[in-house]
Structures are given as C-alpha cells and as structure tokens.
Image (tube, rainbow, N blue to C red):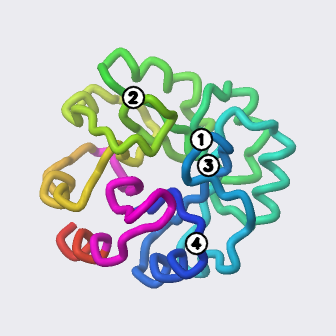
C-alpha cells in the first residue's frame, strides 16, 4: 500500500491519482506548509482520500470528512481514545512519532480502536519533516494493529523499503522528499520510485 500525503494542487492530484497510488492525503492542520485552505478542483477518483488532522474539534473533523468524502481520518496529534471513538463512522489512522522501543507504549490504548497506526520520525513539526528514524526499532513492535511506515522516505530508499519486513507493516507514506515545493509532488520521482519499489 502506498500513500502520498500533503497534496492540494488539482492537476498534481490528478497526476498522482493516475499513478495507481492507494491513498492520497490532505492536511487540514493550519500550521502545516501543506495546509489545504480551499477545496481543490479535483479530488482523487481512484485513490482513497485521507484527511490529516491535529487535535482538531471533532465536529470540524466531521464536517471536513463529509465535505471531502474522506475514506480515512488520520489523527496526528494527542487525540485520546474517547475522541477517536467519536469518529468511528470513518476508518482511522493514528500517527505516532517513534524514536525508541519505549515509544510503542503510547499505542496500547488505541489497539482495537483504529484501523492503522502510522509510525513517523520525531521532528520539529508533527509530520512532513523529511526526517528518518531507525527502522530497526520497529522490530520491537508486537501490537495487533497494522501500520504504515513514514518518516523521510525518499527517492533513494526503494531498496531499503523493499528490504524492510515486519508482519504488521502494510504500506508506506510518502511526502516531503518527493516534492518540488511544499504541497507539489514530483511525478517523475514518484514514478521512478514506484517502478523500483
């Protein structure tokens, strides 16, 4: 499964959608350089739509999810399990920043509540930092929830991704290292990577 996150330009979305990507992510966090401030003229028709939120008001999340016909809601903040429970009409991805094996303890309260975890690097922002982390740490993850691998995956990482194995890893999340500028993906880099991956 491949997710391309941080999109907002209609033509760019159309081009990425045509690549056969599984998920396309839209960031609805105003502090992000990839923030979607207005609805793009084109929304994915093939790829599933993912909305990324950070500690947003539940009703606002619901309104946005309905407006964009989202398939998934990705929560990238400190949303507690009770908050997650209010959004179960949608499939849920809960993101966690991982640096050491001890960071997996934070996932336990969300077991059985969400569809996927997303494991990202710790960085200055809540995501899209382009920073990598030590994937070997993930071998200590023994939870029952499948996860997406994120954190600075770039065009040169195709072999590294191919070599990574974990029984619960179901896909990868691509963002900043495949951009010409924030929110605008480089289609050639994506195509090349996907052909090798």
| Relative to 11, residue 104 above or below | above
Q: CA distance from mark 4 to mark 1?
A: 29 Å
Mark 4 or 1: the one toward you: 4
Tell me, yes or no, whether the two marked residues, 2 and 4, touch with CB atoms within 8 Å: no
Mark 1 secondary-structure assignment: loop
Task: Give me the disc on residue 186.
Answer: none
Residue at 43%, 61% in the rendered image: 181
Question: Would you say residue 170 sits in the magenta stretch?
Answer: yes
Other residues around mark 2 within 10 Å, as few (<14) / some (14–19) / many (≥20): some
Mark 3 secondary-structure assignment: strand
Residue bearing the label numbered 3: 52
Q: CA distance from mark 3 to mark 4?
A: 16 Å
Task: Give me the disc on residue 9.
Answer: 4
> x%, y% of residue 78?
62, 26
In which image quadrant can residue 4 be found?
bottom left
Mark 4 secondary-structure assignment: loop
> x%, y% of residue 27?
61, 52
Mark 2 or 1: the one toward you: 2
């Amino acid at each position: 499964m491949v997710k391309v996150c941080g999109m907002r330009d209609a033509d760019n979305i159309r081009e990425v959608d045509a690549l056969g990507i599984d998920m396309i992510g839209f960031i609805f966090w105003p502090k992000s350089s990839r923030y979607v401030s207005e609805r793009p003229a084109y929304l994915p028709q093939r790829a599933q739509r993912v909305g990324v939120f950070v500690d947003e008001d539940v009703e606002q999340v619901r309104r946005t999810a309905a407006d964009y016909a989202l398939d998934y809601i990705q929560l990238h903040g400190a949303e507690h399990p009770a908050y997650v429970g209010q959004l179960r009409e949608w499939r849920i991805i809960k993101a966690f920043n991982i640096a050491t094996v001890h960071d997996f303890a934070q996932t336990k309260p969300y077991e059985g509540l969400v569809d996927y975890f997303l494991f990202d690097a710790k960085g200055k922002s809540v995501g899209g930092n382009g920073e990598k982390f030590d994937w070997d740490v993930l071998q200590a993850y023994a939870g029952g929830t499948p996860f997406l691998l994120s954190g600075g995956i770039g065009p040169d990482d195709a072999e590294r991704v191919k070599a990574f194995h974990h029984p619960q890893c179901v896909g990868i999340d691509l963002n900043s290292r495949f951009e010409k500028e924030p929110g605008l993906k480089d289609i050639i880099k994506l195509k090349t990577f996907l052909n090798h991956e």
